[in-house]
Amino acid sequence: MTDIFARTGRYRCMIRDEPSTTITIGWEQMTGENPMVYYSTSDYGQNYNSYANQAYPQRTVHAKGMHNHFARLSKLRPNTVYYFVIKDSDGISKRYSFKTLPDEHESRLSIIGGGDSRNHKTARQNANKIVARCRPHFVLFAGDMTGGDSSREWQEWLDDWQMTIGQDGRLTAVLAARGNHEKSDASIVDMFDVSHQMVYYGLTFARGLMRIYTLNSMQSSSSSQLAWLEQDLKESQTVAWRMAQYHHPMRPHNSRKHEQEYMRLHWGKLFYSYKMQLALECDSHISKITWPVRATTNKSEVGYDEGFVQDPAGTVFVGEGGWGAPLRAADDTKRWTRASGSFNQVKWFFVDLNKVEIRTIKTENAKSVTYLSDDNRFYMPQNIDLWNIDGADYITLYNRNKASFVPEKAQILMEIASSSARFSNDEVTLKWKSIYEVDRVKFKIQISTNKIFWKTVGILQGKGPSANKQSNYEYVDRTEKRGGKYYYRIAAIDQSGKEFVQEYIEVRTLGSETLDLIEGSVHSGQLQVPLTLTEPTRVIIELFDTKRRPVFVREFDAVSGGQSFPLNIRHLEKGFYLLEISCNGKLLKKSVKITN
């Protein structure tokens, strides 16, 4: 499926880094050049110039007959809807949107999980439609997207994936794992831009509410992956919930499938030792859910069956595929199996600090299921067909490890926004708003005539943590002004006095001369200094930082006429500087801004 407005298509988004402040947008670039993602928290439709932010694709790869582009967006606001379009030389895409994950451990997460979508197109499309209707925060997909890993199959798969997009253009992020029908790790890396080339990785959600491990059952379970998993689990014991997704089940519930004894020996031991409470498995094309179990080699333990026994402190295993692959019989149940069946299905998890609710959605009637929204995503949509287990349509897994939970330190995401200034009666009234304000912050208000040398005129105490609510501030500067143009700088400072947010405002009182601004970038390596001389003369160029410390001096003889002198700035940090040029008995001053 391609976009009717531009020759881009097969859109998807992924989480490969911090889930509340980053996201990756992927698409196929069919024709056109120089694609750019334009995005903002406001919806401007296809008016790309109105969007506040833009990003080039950081990675492009030709794979499976497609030119795959990936734009990795960062410094986003948590729990916030972003709207975006993709513009290239041929046109503009439709307007789409995504929503970042929440950044509070008291949040609740909705997750859909499953896998094995390889053969039956209608069943695959039905499961995709369930994603669009249930509006989860993200999807776990544990491998076997296609049957033969061919270009044609992947293109059809991504065409069908467009059915996960909501009626309002909302994309749902996916965390992808590799299955045995993906012939190499590169298939997953090139389609979903995962962060690890061997397709095993971990991501923490909502300040430690949950850490999800995507494992690769096609890699050795006793190699570097095992060492990484054990070390990461050791370091993540203060997380509230630990969950794994991978393709091959340790103990498949279909008699045709092989037991994965090495996985049981290596991973199973770690799962119990480090409290992996939940695991999503696939491959067998059936539905199952187990009681909490732990791996053991003691066959005399009560309830022992194929290397596991029930244990309330163990792992609940759910699965095993059913996103569209041919169904198989659930004919290999264990003594610790809670329920099993054979039907097309996905798992639906509601996660909070106290419990996880696990539902199984039968996907055959997807077309008749109504759409949820961000506001009611934890409700049951009309006509949803849920698997009944023990007389209920969901089971509850309670958090036995809540006492050891320690929320991760909050990120400093604070922003100063909506700033304004008004000059009247020799006073300047500054107004601004903050969002995601942190505790014990202060605001330092400074004034300058050249944006180089700043004078502090006031300090305001912050109002305290505000999450995504805005706090309003006002400051009146009554210091004497000589007229002309002034600049104000509002800086948020922490307890140690370190600045971490700045906002600049320009105020005009009466007309006056200000310093010309020259801009250069560290990337280009040179700053071009224009100068017109009426006669040959000796020239001295000096560059100072904002504390008037010299950082560069160049002295040379110059001829008359208009010319430009290059200065090497590769060694300088970005920011503002003062440039002084001595020539013909005069001193010229210019403001310099150096960017990345």
Image (cartoon, grey):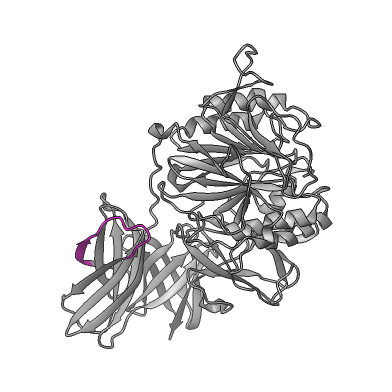
Q: Furthest-top residue in view? A: 300
| Rendered location of residue 550, percent (x, y) | 35, 61
Q: Answer above or below: position of 35 versus 380.
A: below
At x 60% / y 29%, what residue is drawn?
A: 227
- Main secondary structure found in the magenta portion: loop
Which image quadrant for residue 423? bottom left
Any part of residue 58 in sight: no
At x 53% / y 24%, what residue is drawn?
A: 273
Q: Answer above or below: position of 259 versus 429.
A: above
| Rendered location of residue 493, percent (x, y) | 28, 56
At x 55% / y 65%, what residue is drawn?
A: 524
Q: Is residue 189 magenta?
A: no
Q: Is residue 434 left or right of residue 398?
A: left
Q: Furthest-bottom residue in view? A: 511
Q: Answer above or below: position of 423 versus 445.
A: below
Please state which of residues 497 and 41 is positioned toward the viewer in this rendering. 41
| Rendered location of residue 70, percent (x, y) | 64, 59
Q: Furthest-front residue in view? A: 391
Q: Which residues are magenta?
A: 456-470
Please state which of residues 419 and 585 is positioned toward the viewer in this rendering. 419
Q: Is residue 512 left or right of residue 130?
A: left
Circle count: 0
Q: Is residue 409 left or right of residue 368?
A: left
| Rendered location of residue 16, percent (x, y) | 58, 50
Please state which of residues 289 and 193 is positioned toward the viewer in this rendering. 289
Which image quadrant for residue 405? top left
In which quadrant will I find the N terminus?
A: bottom right
At x 56% / y 77%, what residue is drawn?
A: 45
Any part of residue 242 in sight: yes
Q: Is residue 460 magenta?
A: yes
